[in-house]
Structure formats: structure tokens, C-alpha cells
Image: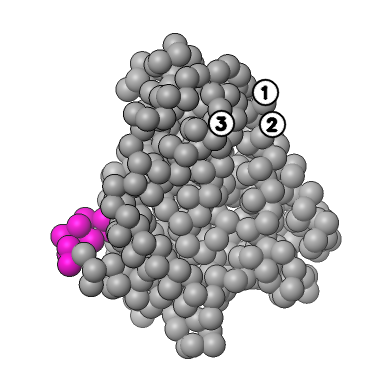
Amino acid sequence: MTRALEASLLFILTISILIFTDEKKRAYVAIASAVLAIILGLVKPENVVEYLNLDVLGLIAGASVISAYLSESGLTNEVARRALFWSGGDLRKLTWALAMISGIVSLFIENVTTLIMLAPIVFAIARALSLDAVPMLLAVAFASNLGGAALLVGDPQSALAAGYFDLDFLDFIFHNGKPSIFWMVLTALMVSTTVFTFMFIKGRFDIEMGKRVGGLRNPKLAKVSLTALAIKIALLSFRKELGLGLSAPAFVGAGLLLAYTRDWKFAVRSIEWNLLLFLAGMFVLVGALQDSGVMDAIASWFLSTVSCDFCRLSSTLILLSVAVSAVVDNVPYLMAMFPVIEVVSKNCNIYYFKLLLALLIGATLGGNITYFGTSTNIAAVHLLAEEGYKVSFRRFVKYGLVYTALALASASALYYAIWG
């Protein structure tokens, strides 16, 4: 058996196991597979440290500390409480506001954390009015998944792209003078959330309920956390001019919070250790695919099948990414596709960033079709079950397909208008 075939089988087996593995145990699967890849000689020992990409892992670790303190301050609860009064008792307006808050907050805070903070408000209103909480909470979850992909400080997907292609914070807003992924995700968020809530939400409620919703718990901590976030963003925006890696800005922001709170235990607990271990394992696995020549073979197949026509290449990337991300976590998929994009870009003389945008649009918008696609959707279904709402796979797909189709159509239209 060739090394390429061994590496491919190990990667496919790992992804298959991850689909049916609990979120908290995925790291063990990834690490075990990485160790096996090293033992089998599928990845060169001298390349292991390089493939681990400690700079990206450091960025995610520092960002998780800042996110945790933002959450601890109660800032999101305060914004949600004000949205409740702003809605004037209109359930459709409230759901739209909560979903938009979810998407915007997820630019800076981990998606599942955002969902957990907003879910109690949804359930409180649903219980008081004997309403179905399913479409309301799913709107919040779907929006959270979209928002996290828009900027470098959100989901790990953006950090992975930045690490591989040496991008900074501003590249996700404007790149070479053109609007980047942020504007496409923002457009998708607004269009899909607005139409979704109009289609599936209606009714009124008593706005006095807002008095029972918790607000800002620690104003000083909120101010320091926002300052730390602003410093991180500023340093990430000009990191190339300052000669900084990705992790240094996050560590500076986290360090400021630690200096203020002096709570090392909370900071250490807030780090997403499972995510870091999972990513480390996947880094090595993808490295095995590169060392064994699998990625070059995939790129050659891709070129021979699709050709170098930009429209065919980009649309295939978007649709393939949507299909894969509907059932598989998009992190390993993106990590595997980055080298493919690089090879295709060189062979077809197409600017890599145009292909990267197509990949990110498909992978980040496609995760809402099923609840297997993202941990946020899995968490949403779990929270609903705890409240007595059983969401069938068919019902979830009905909502997910509508939301995804709206998001994909609007984001793709903007993408081709700007970069086509």
C-alpha cells in the first residue's frame, strides 16, 4: 500500500469517526490519528512542528480568554435585554434582533457561548406565551454560525485561513481595495435572517418580560474586555507592518485582562483546550496528506475535471464546500483544501484570494443545512431537547435549507459582482 493511499485512508477514517463522536472527545480522535500518522511515517518528523502551526493555536488560545471575559461581564445579556424592549412586543422583531445580535457577537465570541447566553431569553418568552421555541432558537444558532466566519477574531476557520495565506485582520474586510468575506457574510446574515423570521415567526408578547432578563453584571470588566479586544484587533490589522505573528496580538489582549483581574485560574479554564488539541491533531493529519502527495493529486484531479475556467472553478468550490460542510465539520475540510487552492491558483494563474473566498463562502454557509455541520447546531438541538422540544432531522433540514439557500444566494451574488 502506497503512502498516499495510507494517508488518504487514515484521513477518511478519522473524519468518519469524528462525525459520530461527541464534541468533547473529538480532540482524542484527532490526536490519536496524528500519532498514528507519525508512527506509520506518513508525515516527516522534521515537519511536525511546522505543521502544528503554533502561531494560529496561540491566536485561538488568546482569543478564547478575551471571549470568556466578555461573556462573564454580561455585555451580551444587556444588549439582548435592550433588544427586547426595542421590539415593542413584536415576536418577529425580537427574533430578528436576537439573531442579528447573535451573528454580530459571534464576530468576537465563540459561537456556542453566544447561543448559550441568548437561549434563556428565547425559552423564557416561549414558555410565557406557550410558543414553539424551535424556529426562534434555530434562527439565533444559524446567525451565530454565519457571524463567526466574517472576521479574523471569530471562528477558527478564519484564523486557519489567515495562518496559511499570511492574511491580517483588514484582509477579511477589504483585500486589494475590494470588499472581502466580511461584507458577503454580513449580507447573507441580514438577508437570510430577515426572510427567515418573516416566514416562520409571528406573534406578540408582553415587553415587561424584559425586566426579568439579566443585564450587565460587571461594567468595569466589560470596558476592560472591550479595550483588550480593540487592542487585539488593532495589532492584527497592522501586524505585518509591526512584524508580529498572529498569536502576539491575542496574547497582548489576554495579558491586559489578566493584569486587571489577576484571575489566572479563570483564564486557564476559559482556553478552548479541546479545540486546540483537535486542531493540532488535524494539522498533523493534513501534513501527512501533503507529505505523501495526496494534495497534489487532488489538485490535479480537480483541474482535469473542472478546468481553469474561473466561474466553473469557483462555483464548484462553493457547491462542493456546501455539500461537505452540511455533514462534516468544516475545519478539517478547509485545512485539506488550502493546499489544493494554492496549487490550482498557480496552475490556472487565478489569484488565490478569489478561490479562497469561494471556499470560505461555501464552507461557512453550508454548515447550517443539518445539525451535524457545526457544534452550534448540535448545541441548539441539545438545548431544545432539554426544554422538551424534540427536533426531528427532517424539520431541522427544512429550516436549515431555507436559511442556507437565502444566505448562499445573497453572498454568492455579491461575491461574483465584486470578484467575478
Q: Residues within 10 Å of mark 2 (few under 14, many from 20)?
A: some
Q: Residues within 10 Å of mark 1 (few under 14, many from 20)?
A: few
* Residue in view at x 54 percent, y 35 percent: 86
Residue of label 1: 199
Q: Could you tell me how far apart the alpha carbons at marks 2 and 3 are, in whole angstroms?
A: 17 Å
Disc number for residue 281: none
Compared with residue 35, is residue 348 higher up or lower down, i.e. above or below? below
Left or right: 2 in relation to 411:
left
Q: Nearer the viewer, mark 3 or mark 1?
A: 3
Where's residue 220, x and y in %? 30, 60
Left or right: 223 in relation to 265:
right
Compared with residue 327, is residue 260 higher up or lower down, i.e. above or below? below
Q: Could you tell me how far apart the alpha carbons at marks 1 and 2 are, in whole angstroms?
A: 6 Å
Q: Which residues are magenta?
A: 262-272
* Magenta-colored segment: predominant secondary structure: helix
103 or 399, which lies in front? 103
Q: Nearer the viewer, mark 2 or mark 3?
A: 3
Compared with residue 165, is residue 111 higher up or lower down, i.e. above or below? above
Residue of label 3: 87
Residue of label 2: 195
Callout 1 touching callout 2 (CB < 8 Å): yes
| Mark 1 residue type | Met
